[in-house]
Amino acid sequence: MSAVGESLTAERLDVDPDVTAFTKLATDAGWGDGLPLVPPTEEKVQAFVAASRRYPEHVLGEIPPRGAACTVELLAINAVMAGAPAESMPLLVAAIEAMTAPEYGLFSQNATTNSVVPGLLVNGPIRHDLEIPFGAGCFGGQAGPAPAIGRATRLVMRNVGDQVVGVTSKSVFGQPARVVSFVVGEWEERSPWTPLAERRGVPGNAVTVFGGTGTIDIADIHADSGPELLEIIGKSLAFPGTNAFIHRSVSGSGGDEDILVCLPPPWVDLITADIPDLEDVQHLLWMHAALPVSWWPATHREKLEAHDVIDDRGYVKLLSTLEQYLVMVCGGLGNLHALALHTFGQGHSVTRPIGDIPPPPNGSAS
Amino acid sequence: MNVRIYDGDTHIVEPPALWQDRVPTKFKALAPRWVKNDDGSESWVYEDGRRVSPVAGMMAPSGTSPVTWDLYSRTTYGEIRRGAYDPEARLHDMDTDFVYAHVLHPTLALSGPTNFSRDNVELQLVCTRAYNDWMSEFCSTDLDRLIGLALLPISGIEDTIAELERVRDLPGIDGVLLTAWPNGRATPLPEDDKFWAAAAAADMPVVLHVGITGSSEQDAFMGFMKLGDRSLVLGHINLERTAHAIMEALSYIIIGGVLQRHPALTIVGTETGIGWIPFFLEQTDDNFRRHRFWAETELTMLPSEYYRRQCFNTFQVDRAGILARDGIVENIVWSSDFPHTGADWPNSTVTIEHNLVGVPEDERRLILTENCRRAFRLA
């Protein structure tokens, strides 16, 4: 039956409204991450549902490993607890829909021994409305609602998906973003290229969900041209112990995943002075992100050779195709660093529009 | 949503003591009386037992799932949302739904004074006045947000006009509800013109809920109910949503020259939907162009021009109408039907978003705020 006419259905509990008391109660009950939690009162949850522009029982997707349906109401409850603003609900709706798309592979990310975590890459004017950081410190440290927005997705994994450290999640180390995720915008105004989401078929307000295993800082002070800089960045991406290389050695189809490369505006200026087209930039990254097969010990070499992933130069490329390099412009104006995030594989980044309104409920009585 | 949302069609549920607290002593035995039965159920008793109706389970189901609805079920006032009959609770329900103002129609009395008695005119009149006095008291809790409609008699044109003129100065009464033609019958008569003139002079918008319904429609409904064939009952209810009655009423009102003779009169069709309006106006204009010569019509403008000048209609779920709103965007008013079955409370804003996808801000402001304020002369 449709959502029409239904109000909130979650169990109501009488709790101490004090944040400290509620946080203790919720954390003891397994609903929290240790940080303070905002009590999800009926009024607050209803406001968040309304801001989502979806009915409360609208199912956004099933959250693994439990496979439980994440309704708008459940998302709203977790978003309230996380301290996210109500205005972020359309972004969160799109993010959960993207994460639960089959091609994303959320089950393996939520259950793996890896430290991967779904992060949100935001495009469009909504970056400004929601104060999504895209300048200095955008991956952490800039004050604003982004950590709370990311935390809402993490609480959904915990409370809807039953992702429990050491039980259903086998992540050996975890990582800080498993608490607040990473919610980053693209500095579209400083990018010479079409925005990331639009390149993936979604213009305007959009979120790309990307599973990041952690941030890799790539520093350089010597490169004096676009090709030199891309060579350094590309080579820095390739190290033997990445999941991408592991997949190449296991199935040969490895390098199936995406890698996010964040370039700060000064480096983009330097690169585009020589190489204006993004496809050429991706090509150089793809070409340089490789290692000579001789770097691997014999056992590993045998696996790589068995899967025919060694090119004519005797190199193994990190990824199969250049399109898998997701290049995004963001970061501060310090002229020394790029940032890269590898992923876990077994899935692909997914982009969804934000604020997309479902068809009207005419005749939706079933 | 950055506008104050005015809901053009909501309902109250008449509280248990409404009539017994207000009618003169000599009418108390005959006036509607709420009773608690031995088995715990509740009923409304009319005319001292001549007719008894259970407190129906679907009078105010907002906030519950349609899977739980049953037109044949019973409920009690303890189970009905308090906001259906208590003004403070009502305002809280409105806040929960992010809606600023409600235009208030009856529930039990929606069929008009026949609800009180079929043949006792005196009883009809005192009960109608009692309802209107109660509505005024209800709205006085917040005159900005509670927009009351007064019920009009069906006992003749003079009674109808007299009550119109009595309620015009009652606080919180911002419109009058017709449940029959002003003459009190199911068909219009020339004498109705005195009422239209009086309503225009009083600057009181005249509301037709679904259409101008008469007792014959009520009889049909009750007949289907007694037959017990649920699909027939649903078919009858569906007529409410498909604009049959309002097209009939507006045909008489517009073509009959009511709006020509009374340019200050406003007609508000509530719970009518809007998707039919472009069709209706196009057909009516075309018909007028072809037949106006032999018909000796007094109209000096196209029928559609009268409609645009003086009429409003409310809709709940009508994406078809929104997509066809060109030319009527200043005549359409969003509504919820709260607490009846058409409402999506407390998710009205979600339903609004679904319906208004792609509608620019200035038009949203008309549909959600300004048209309703204009229709009901809200300062």
Image: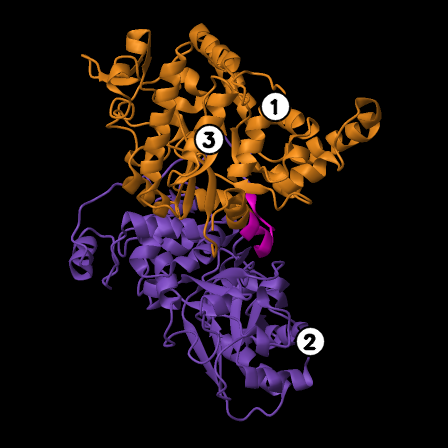
Chain colours: A purple, B orange
| Subunit under mark 2 | A
User: What percent of the width, then of the height, locates residue B377?
Assistant: 50, 45
Residue drawn at the location 42% of the way across and 19% of the way down: B113
Q: Quadrant of residue B309?
A: top right
Nearer to me, B61 or A294: B61
Q: Nearer the viewer, residue A63 or A7?
A: A7
Whether labels 1 and 3 belong to a single chain: the reply is: yes
In the image, residue B150 sits, relative to residue B238, either above or below, namely below
Magenta-tinted stretch: B355-366
Tell me which numbered mark, 1 or 3, is placed earlier along the sequence: 3
Amino acid type, callout 3: Leu
Residue B210 drawn at (x, y percent): 53, 27
Residue B281 visible to the viewer: yes
Element under disc 1: helix
Above or below residue B168? Residue A329 is below
Q: Residue at x 58, y 85 (%)?
A: A229
| In the rendered image, the vertical position of residue B300 relative to residue A330, given as above or below | above
Q: Amino acid under label 1? A: His
Give the residue number, with chain letter if any, for mark 2: A277
Same chain shared by disc 3 and disc 2: no
Q: How far is disc 1 from disc 3 in space, using C-alphas? A: 27 Å
**Residue corresponding to mark 1:** B244
Residue to which mark 3 is pinned: B164
Distance Cα–Cα, label 3 vs label 2: 75 Å
Is mark 1 in CB contact (under 8 Å) with mark 3? no
Q: Is residue A228 magenta?
A: no
Kindly indicate the quadrant of the structure image that contains residue A71. top left
Q: Residues within 10 Å of mark 2 (few under 14, many from 20)?
A: few
Q: Position of residue B49 (x, y in %)?
A: 29, 8
Proximity of marks 3 and 2: CB atoms separated by less than 8 Å: no
